[in-house]
Image (cartoon, coloured by chain):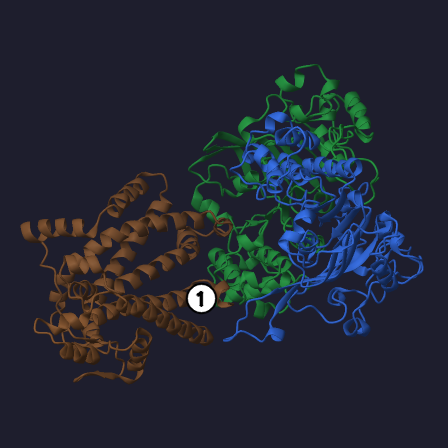
Amino acid sequence: MTQPSSAPSPTASSATAAHATAAQAPDASEPASAEPLLQAVGLTKHFPVPGTGLWPARRDARPVLRAVDGIDLTLHTGESLGVVGESGCGKSTAGRLLTRLLEPTSGVLRYQGVDITHASRRELAPVRSQIQMVFQDPYASLNPRQTVGEIVSTPLEVHRINPHGGRRARVLELLETVGLSPEHYNRFPHEFSGGQRQRVGIARALALEPKVIVADEPVSALDVSIQAQVVNLLQRLRRDLGIAFVFIAHDLAVVRHFSQRVAVMYLGKVVETAPRDALYRAPQHPYTQALLSAVPEPDPPSGERLDVGAGRIRLTGDVPSPLDPPSGCRFRTRCPRAQDLCAREEPLPRTPDGAEPGHLAACHFPGVN
Amino acid sequence: MLRFLIRRTLSAALILLVVSAVTYLLFFALPSDPALLACGKQCTPQLLATIRHNMGIDAPVPVQYWHFLVGVFAGRNFGAASCPAPCLGYSFVNGRPVLQTLLNRFPATASVALGAAVLVLTFGVGAGMIAALRRGRAADKVAMGLALVGASMQIYFFGIVVRYVFVDQLAWLPLPGYTSPGASLTGWAGGMLLPWITLAVVNVATYARFTRSSMLESLSEEYVRAVRAKGLGPWGVYVKHAWRGAMTPIVTMFGIDLGLFLGGALITETTFNIPGIGKLAVDSVADSDLPMMMGTVLAASTAMVLVNIAVDACYAVIDPRVRAL
Amino acid sequence: MNPLTPVNPATVSSPRTDDHAAGGEPFLQVRDLSVRFATEDGPVQAVDGLSFSLERGRTLGIVGESGSGKSVTSLAVLGLHDRARTSVDGSIRLEGAELVGADEARLRGLRGSRMAMVFQDALTALSPYYSVGDQIAETYRRHTRCSRRAAGERAVQMLSLVGIPSPQRRAKDYPHQFSGGMRQRVMIAMALCCDPDLLIADEPTTALDVTVQAQILELLAEVQQEFRTSIVLITHDLGVIAGIADDVLVMYAGRSVEHGSVAEVLTAPRHPYTMGLLASVPRLSSAVDVPLKPVPGSPPSLLAVPGGCAFHPRCQARDLLPDDLCSSRRPALVAEDARDGRDGGDGHAAACHLGTAERVAFARRTVEPSESNDTRRIQGTNR
């Protein structure tokens, strides 16, 4: 789909590639490496919104919040996929769908070729141990009344796993892996700094030897000087343990550093997907371009101070409400390239002329600025 | 707002329906047989059957409940006694429709409730505000100490002691009791004084502590700091902004308490012999007057439901964020 | 965005002095500011000997991490700290007038009129109970004693100034009815309504998305150009500083560790902490296949600030200096030229024991990739 290696031919359009991949999935003769580890096709989550009328609205007229509205994402073994977007774009909901903490409204979610879109609790149990999540707020996601040892060994207890050498030994090993020391075992979360707490959260996610970790803004709550420590740790886990990562963040520079492929989300849709270098060097979607040019970088030009507006694609206005997204292309209300067509027709992801294969932009008028 | 009120009224009606059904089932499933009590010493099976029929308790319970509901809207007859339209039952003990008795008793209950509510709000909220603004200082400690003492008081103990000291011994306060304010305003206020003070003292404590913590929470809000950064003085900071934010939980609690008071302050009314709905409830239990018991329960739940609608309307006035819902 | 329309400063009744009335003294001068307060766990020195000055129409960026004392500093300038449990020493002079120890009534007169504050999160800093128009008008009326109607008109004028579409109608709306970016504009409109000379912005864009952040920073820069407002911008984001500030002050554990022009500090940092911060942040242009270079350790708790140089336990340049120098002696914040006995210079100062030669050696080393605990290969069989 979004991964060039999975498409049978580099010139095939994304739609054919999708069908081809889907058709090939159950084929046993297919080499294991070509099958995506985690694949979302048209994944959608609509949240019902409490009505304000006297009587409950009819089912089809009920207002819904379109948090995630038909996204395609593919994650291969050991790969890191970055998901970027601003608040309210649905990236966190997407993360919760990929880990099946939420059940999709529609679309398909496959893990190692098995459809887990609507899998029951029991069917999910083995999958859950392989797809873990790391949360943004290390203060809120750790039980303050449990010691670090208890927190990290909880997944082992829940999944009734008795590792060789005992749970305690395994937990100590995990603490070492994430850069904590054995004496931290009996301490409580409040005794730790933010960075250390995030390490505890990561150790907990590692306890079941997952193949995938979905990290939702794992560093944005941390002090600047600490963020790099945690990014390096995650990088090392990917490299040495072969864990595939979905790295959800709003910080484009951090995502660039961590991810091999990047998906940009806007108002519940993926507007652009590309290998990292292509996306950052030659972004095709005007939203990606605006995002990139808005990133403040700590480098003043020599001499005089920066003119804030210089060389930026400045977006006007705010993100529209996901309760009532614009027709056609959702970005058109803020897009400098918008034309009549954009209001009428929703742009489908396609590879723009001159872009490299695997670079998809959902735009009627893509192009490098 | 209108839509909100209609919706709330409909749900209130539903709540009352459920409450009446549950009380009906509970009370009429009781083993005591009111007909047997009414039949007296020279009871014959025929007489008993007649009384049963007149009381309307010869049918199965669901059918009885249906008759009760019909009676609410259309009125009904119990033997020779008639019970006109909003009929909530007929008391065979005092020989009058239940609703009539309830309405007779309501002014006394309302007098106790509203007077006590005014005192509670004035002194409770006032003390809590002072304590919050003087946090950690003497005024805070005194106010909270008194609040603790007040909160540990029980009406039947505190009321009786106060009555003994201030009425019986010192004669500073008039005897508690109910006089219609139409007949004598001073007599009414004098008789109510003791119940008001008693009910207030016990509840003021809760309000003072609640107001204090709610105010402290509100004072720590960022927008209160922002109001100070705008250069506003104490009135603007504490009253206009901080208090506005602290009000919501207090209105919630006040709603519950006012609902309880209006449904009849059982202990206060009994302690001071005030002929209100609370006393009526206690007496009807003593008399095994089932229809009257049900009537008092319904009255209490109606008071609670109505006050709650008022509280919800207050939320919308206080907090614009609620208006959107 | 609407063009900035000039407002008439004469409508503000607070006394105004000419720019040079104070006789050469900087517009805002903070000297040796110390803020201490008692907490449940013990006394805390949140700000320790801080000095800086700010001229009319300039922007000073204060950078620091959690617990660096940057927000406490801003509260102390406005006198918004809890007076009962906080002690403030040193001097804060606004156009020559001392603010430390000034009585509350006088400070109240200055707050909101001469000096105003923009808070981080407009959703919590605006009262949810009053319309935004009322909240702006309230500030204006407090300082001008004008009629309700005039204040209402001023509110609409301010909303239009900060680029809120249909300001007449939106003035009646409540904060929760605005988007994040528009809410921050409202906050700025409220801070500007009495035409203040000093604007303190505490993380004004941290709660916002990057595209909206760019809009807000631009608005602040426009306002400054129009009204010659002096801005103190507090942030943890060096990128924001680069975009808007003239000078920058780097704070660590309540102390100023580096101070200088933005160009100087960001391109040729002199304190190992500043160097570390700059090196740890990934850029859109930095190499991707090498690990990031984090500052080891965590910021210290203010309850237990390390002795000597507060940064020494995390400092990677410590091996360049004699054993116990950094842990025993607290370095003063001095300009390098001054220390070398030279005159003039650019005022770029750092509080570090490193001499010029050692600093250059260290700076060269931080450019090269390092091996930290998080970049070593994971040993043993984890799977």
Query: At numbered mark 1, what does the secondary structure look like: helix, strand or loop?
Result: helix
Which amino acid, by three-letter code, is at mark 1?
Ala
The total number of labels drawn is 1
Identify which residue is drawn at 61% across, 75% down.
A61
Q: Position of residue A174 (x, y in %)?
A: 67, 32
Query: Which chain gets the green colouring?
Result: C
Q: Eyeballing the image, is B54 above or below C328?
A: below
Q: Is residue C325 left or right of residue B199?
A: right
Q: Residue furthest front?
A: B45
Residue B120 lies in what quarter of the image?
bottom left
Residue A85 lies in what quarter of the image?
bottom right
Q: Eyeballing the image, is B237 above or below B145?
A: below
Query: Which chain gets the brown colouring?
Result: B
Identify which residue is drawn at 82% across, 36% down.
C290
Of residue B251 and residue B161, the one placed in the foreground of this image is B161
| Quadrant occupied by the C terminus of chain A | bottom right
Q: Colour of chain A?
A: blue
| Quadrant occupied by the N terminus of chain A | bottom right
Q: Position of residue C278 (x, y in %)?
A: 74, 36
Q: Position of residue A263 (x, y in %)?
A: 78, 54
Of residue A244 and residue C23, the one placed in the foreground of this image is A244
* Residue C208 visible to the viewer: no
Of residue A14 and residue B90, the one placed in the foreground of this image is B90
Residue beneath disc 1: B316
Q: Which chain does tag 1 point to?
A: B
Q: Is residue C274 left or right of residue A283?
A: left
Label 1 neighbour load within 10 Å: few <14, some 14-19, many 20+: some
Q: Is residue B15 left or right of residue C143?
A: left
